[in-house]
Image: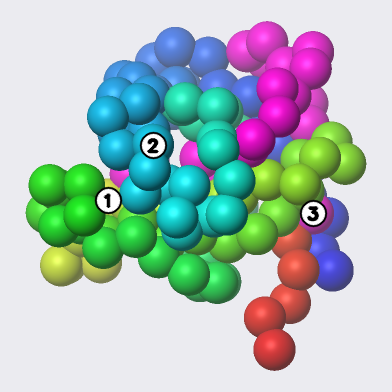
Amino acid sequence: MTILKGLVCREGEGAGCRHFFRRMTEYSDVFERATGERLIPGTLNVNVGVVVPIKEHFRIRGQELKESEDFLFEVCRINGIWAYRIRPLDAMGGGGHGDHIFEIACSKLIPDVPPGTVVEIALFPRD
């Protein structure tokens, strides 16, 4: 297991444009089928300060969301709560905010995480 500390992004520092809120609202059934649970729409963006390539556990194909990019998922924990790191990935290998900003989705509300808060993210090896 790898434990990282990260900072919840402020607007202009990696905070999102609410794309995941729209996707997860419009296609909640696709996200539920992929994860096995109903996620709270949107992601919490966390800057971990170093590049950490995602370890794909599963993905949602872009065409399922009428998007040109796929969405890779990595199971993780944030402040002890089970969650998913989601990484948009286009055909050129880019997408999202890069591998230093984690987009975290969860089926539970993550308490006490306003912008500027330090959080702990646990990543697990993929065997």
The amino acid type, in three-letter code, at marker 3 is Ala
- The x, y position of residue 118, in whole percent, is 78, 26
At 71% from the left and 29% from the top, the residue drawn is 108
* Marks 1 and 2, how far apart at CA: 21 Å
Q: Residue furthest bottom?
A: 127
Per the image, label 1 sits on a secondary structure element best described as loop
At 45% from the left and 55% from the top, the residue drawn is 33
Q: Residue 95: within the magenta?
A: no
* Marks 3 and 1, how far apart at CA: 23 Å
Which quarter of the rendered picture does the N terminus lie within?
Answer: bottom right
Q: Residue 119: within the magenta?
A: yes
Q: Is residue 50 above or below residue 11?
A: below
Depth order, front residue of 114/61: 61
Which residue is under mark 3?
122
Which residue is under mark 1?
95
- The x, y position of residue 84, in whole percent, is 60, 50
Q: Quarter-wise, where is residue 24 in the image?
A: top left
At 70% from the left and 89% from the top, the residue drawn is 127
Asked if the residues shown at circle 2 and circle 3 are in contact, with their CB atoms under 8 angstroms apart, the answer is no
Per the image, label 2 sits on a secondary structure element best described as helix
Per the image, label 3 sits on a secondary structure element best described as strand
Q: Main secondary structure of the magenta part?
A: loop
Q: Quarter-wise, where is residue 11 in the image?
A: top left
- The part of the chain drawn in magenta is 96-122
The amino acid type, in three-letter code, at marker 2 is Ser
